[in-house]
Image: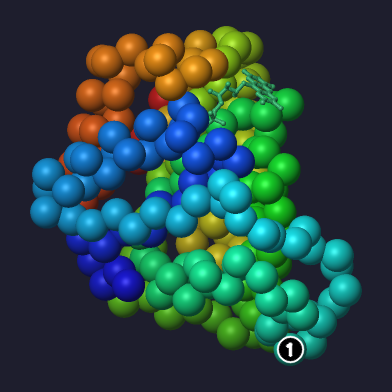
Amino acid sequence: MAIDNQLILGLHLSPRPLGSSSVMLKRFQKGVTEAGGTLEIFSVAGRNIQGCVCCGDCYRTGQCRFSDDMDLVLPALEKASRLVIATPVYFYGVPALGKAFIDRVQVFWSRIYKLGQKRQFPVEPKGLVLSVGATKGKDLFTPIKLSMKYFFDSIGFPRTFSFVGYRLVEEPSDWPEEKLAQVEAYGRDFVLGTLGLVEAY
Ligand SMILES: Cc1cc2nc3c(=O)[nH]c(=O)nc-3n(C[C@H](O)[C@H](O)[C@H](O)COP(=O)(O)O)c2cc1C
């Protein structure tokens, strides 16, 4: 997996495989490809992901007791230095299946904070979050931003990351083309290394 900007892991946290956030991530992927990069997408949609039960196994061993579809993505997550998360807003948070995914990342947190296994990256890791919701409340993205801050921290990424949130998109057909074109440009810039720290929501 990633040793530079070229290879990016995309995590799609909606249970809807072809919904609004999927359209957004695919458009980001288009930009990545145009710039000569590769975005490998793992979607939680249709996956079997057991929620964390706080058993404490990973605190002692650095391994999770559960074996399920998380096994399909953990090796990529262990290697990634470039991460893009696409998530819709469900009840002002990440959808339940996406939240199950996040909670299972506790195994990374345990390795770093319980077992003292500091992660080494070939390059400074970088994260970007793309979010989408149907309404337009001022605080629509605040809880997700906080969840993501501690998600990134748990996997050894900086707590500072780019966050872009789009309001008023309930269905894929609601996407204005100019917003998707902007997402595509983010994809290009992310690969080219020209994307600064973006806060737009
Ligand atoms: C269970 C559920 C809860 C939702 N809660 C919110 C919400 O709190 N705020 C909001 O703006 N939109 C909310 N929405 C709307 C979704 O964010 C919106 O339809 C989004 O485009 C769905 O993305 P997806 O198709 O990628 O899942 C909710 C949708 C569902 C299904």
The x and y percentages for residue 80 are 39, 68
- Residue closest to the far bottom: 61
Q: Which of the 4 quarters of the picture holds residue 25?
A: top left
The x and y percentages for residue 116 are 64, 84
Say which of 143 and 89 sits in front: 89
Residue at 51% over, 26% down: 132
Q: Under tag 1, what secondary structure?
A: helix
**As drawn, is 35 to the left or to the right of 132?**
left
The x and y percentages for residue 58 are 75, 80
Q: Tell me: residue 165, above or below residue 129.
A: above
- Viewer can see residue 12: yes
Q: Which residue is mark 1?
A: 61
Q: Which quarter is ligand 1 in? A: top right
Q: Which of the 4 quarters of the picture holds residue 66?
A: bottom right
Say which of 90 and 143 sits in front: 90
Residue at 46% over, 56% down: 42
Residue at 37% over, 66% down: 81
- Viewer can see residue 113: no
Amino acid type at mark 1: Thr
Say which of 108 and 174 sits in front: 174
Residue at 71% over, 54% down: 100
Q: Tell me: residue 24, above or below residue 96.
A: above
